[in-house]
Image (cartoon, rainbow, N blue to C red):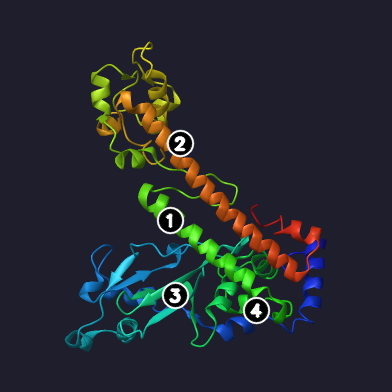
Amino acid sequence: MVANSQVSLDIWRHVRQVSINFTTRLGALLDSTFDRKQGDVNATALNPLRLGEGRGSFSNGDVAIYKGEDVRTFAPLPPTPSDWARPLQAVSNRNAAREVIHASQVLEQLKQINGKECGIILREVARLNTRERLIASWFERRSSSPIAFTHELWRMIHKNGAAEEYGKALLVLINSKVTAYLVNLFSTNNHVMKEDLGRVPIPDPQSMPVAQLASLAQELLNERADLEKNFVMMYRARLPEFDDGEVYIPPSAVLAASKLPKLRLMDLVGRGEVRNNGVASGRIKALTARNLIVCTANPTDPNTATFAQVLDLFLQEPGRGDDTWSQAQNWQLPEMVAAADWLRTYNALCQQAQESWDRFVAQQQHVDELVANWYGFDAAMRAARCHPEWCVT
């Protein structure tokens, strides 16, 4: 063991007991339900077949490529893949390297999938020493929209005849803090190895609360899909890295989707409603830190106070602080008379996104409690969660 705290030893002794001296392991359940392998293709071998992001399409016979960082916990795969690849044409096979020909053949096979192929996709590079959870989700693919995973992922194809409910119950078990904790007890690796996951001791499989876990899996998949669709894709929302974080929605994205009247920053400056007391070449983050950009609208105007709040939101938006004042002149902001309506809309969206995230976190916590109950953990074991010496909480 790489953990030497008393609670870690207590947990391991308890797990040994409930797993009947390590005779029941997670790998047996996974292998009876899934065909577990690395991703479909080696990323390096794909290079000669790549078309570039945004340059391929299913209608042209291309295959969407997804890599490890495209996978997020319980999230659907992004609608835009990290890359596209096109299998070799017959005449071009003559001079291709063996590994490239093999990658091309795999892509062709994915274009011939019979019906639907589904299962679990698990990020291999997981930074175990800084995470409380592994990162896995459920995927589906068909021949009409073929997708391929690189070797930075573990691909678990659901076997014909195995119950999908059971497969989704295993998905939440993999994503639970209990599983990450048990893997962490013996691994300081930056990767999740197949053997690490397979040898995780489990209680009697017959006692696993399959129906409850599968139901929670579907709730988590649905909630995360709503988050991605309604906030990440529509407004470029940034979801927290940790459970207790806050969702951030860029104000510029909300304004772009709004039909409310808007003006460029230079127009607001020209009307005397915004002023920069610094230099034009100054960067927004530096000017803002020194309070040099100010709202100079008529203080008796009832919209001025609200507009000042809105201006501050746009000035504080991450990713725009390196723009100079001159570059920022083309930024769009709400017209002053529309500032209050826009701010209400923005605050409502932020609240809705946060509530959805909080439900998602609560569902994950429910999973953690359910799995901890299955293992029979006491209060001290549940509180341990991860070893404080090398796990960020």
> How far is the residue under mark 4 from the one under mark 3?
22 Å
Q: Earlier in the sequence, mark 4 or mark 3?
A: 4
- Where is residue 91? Give x, y as percent: 17, 87
Q: CA distance from mark 1 to mark 2?
A: 18 Å
Q: What amino acid is at disc 4? A: Leu
The dot on residue 228 is 1
**Is residue 131 something that shows in the picture?**
no
Q: Residues within 10 Å of mark 2 (few under 14, many from 20)?
A: few
Q: Which residue is mark 4?
A: 26
Q: Secondary structure at mark 1?
A: helix
Asked whether residue 199 appears in the rendered view, the answer is yes
Q: Is residue 205 left or right of residue 219?
A: right
Name the front one of labels 1 and 4. 1
Give the mark, 4 or 2, whose residue is nearer the N terminus.
Answer: 4
Q: Please tell me which of labels 1 and 3 falls first in the chain.
A: 3
* 49 or 258, nearer to the observer: 258
Q: Position of residue 369 (x, y in %)?
A: 70, 62
The residue drawn where x is 64% and y is 69% is 212
The x, y position of residue 210, in whole percent, is 64, 74
The relative height of residue 359 versus residue 149 in the rendered view (above or below) is above
> Between marks 1 and 3, how big is the CA–CA gap?
25 Å
Which residue type does callout 3 highlight?
His
Mark 1 or 4 closer to N-term? 4
C-alpha span from label 4 to label 2: 44 Å
Residue marked by disc 3: 151
**Looking at the rendering, which quadrant does residue 253 occupy?**
top left
Please say if 374 is above or below 258. below
For the residue carrying disc 3, how many other residues have a C-alpha within 10 Å: few (<14), some (14-19), or many (20+)?
many
Viewer-nearest residue: 185 or 170 = 170
In the rendered image, residue 169, in percent from the top left (x then y), is placed at: 59, 73
The answer to the question of whether label 1 and label 3 lie on touching residues, with beta carbons closer than 8 A, is no
- Say if 311 sits above or below 197 in the image: above
